[in-house]
Amino acid sequence: MLKHCSLCGRELFFKTLLDGSVEQYCSECNQVFFDTPTPAVIVAVTNAGSILLTRSVGWKHSFWGLVAGYIKSGETAEEAAKREVKEEVGLEIYKIELLRTYTRKERNLLMIGFKAETKSTSIIKSKELEKTTWFKLSEPLPLRPNSISTQIIKKFIRGK
Ligand SMILES: [Zn+2]
């Protein structure tokens, strides 16, 4: 949530709008600041019976997750999915399929879930990642229970 107007820098206050919702407002600019979520993509990258998992630098827990990242201005979610996979692990993805969306309230994110395949398995890891590797889908995965990564793999990759 913002404290100050991003246009003029004045302190924001809460205003009740005509529809009854309460939003942050700058009286100087006559501008309402809606608390909209930040869109991000999360991609289940697979190759044969394996799935690519990553750990970002600085994670304090021991779990792994799927490739994920923010959508840039002017970019579609599909383009963001391709770019994030390319940037983080150096792989081209194809058969990109939109799955469903998820929310992470505590970080105010709207996560757009995809699955995709790769032809190559040779990873070029980015500096943002502590580590990344392929895991066999037939074996238990080191994922946080009920995380979005877990939900996607359970529903769309392993299939129920
Ligand atoms: Zn202002």
Image (cartoon, rainbow, N blue to C red):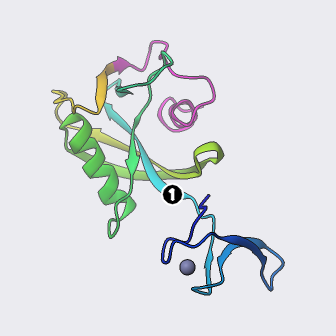
Q: Please identify the quarter of the rendering in which residue 91 is found.
A: top left
Q: Could you say which quadrant of the image residue 134 lies in?
A: top left
Viewer-proximal residue among 6 and 19: 6
106 left or right of 39 in image: right
User: Where is residue 77 drawn, in percent x and y?
Assistant: 39, 59
Q: Residues within 10 Å of mark 1 (few under 14, many from 20)?
A: some
> In which image quadrant can residue 33 be found?
bottom right
What residue did someone put label 1 on?
38
Q: Residue at left 38%, top 57%?
A: 71
Q: Against 58, is 18 above or below?
A: below
Examine the structure image and report whether residue 25 is included in the region drawn in magenta: no
State the residue lying farthest toward the right: 20
The N terminus - image quarter: bottom right
Name the residue type under label 1: Thr
Extreme residue toward the top, this view: 139
Report whether 64 appears left or right of 31.
left
**In the image shown, does 100 or 143 lie closer to the viewer?**
143
Q: Residue at x 67, y 76 (%)?
A: 25
Q: Is residue 72 above or below residue 6?
A: above
- The reply, left or right, for residue 122 in relation to residue 36 is left
Q: Position of residue 42 (x, y in %)?
A: 43, 44
Task: Name the spot of residue 67 as percent of width and height, x first.
Answer: 37, 37
Relative to 73, residue 150 above or below: above
Say which quadrant the C terminus sits in.
Answer: top right
Span of residues in magenta: 135-160
The answer to which of 25 and 125 lies nearer the viewer is 25
* Residue 21 in picture, x, y percent from top left: 79, 73
Residue shown at 45% from the left, 52% from the top: 40
- Give the number of marks: 1
> Which image quadrant shows ligand 1?
bottom right
SS label for mark 1: strand
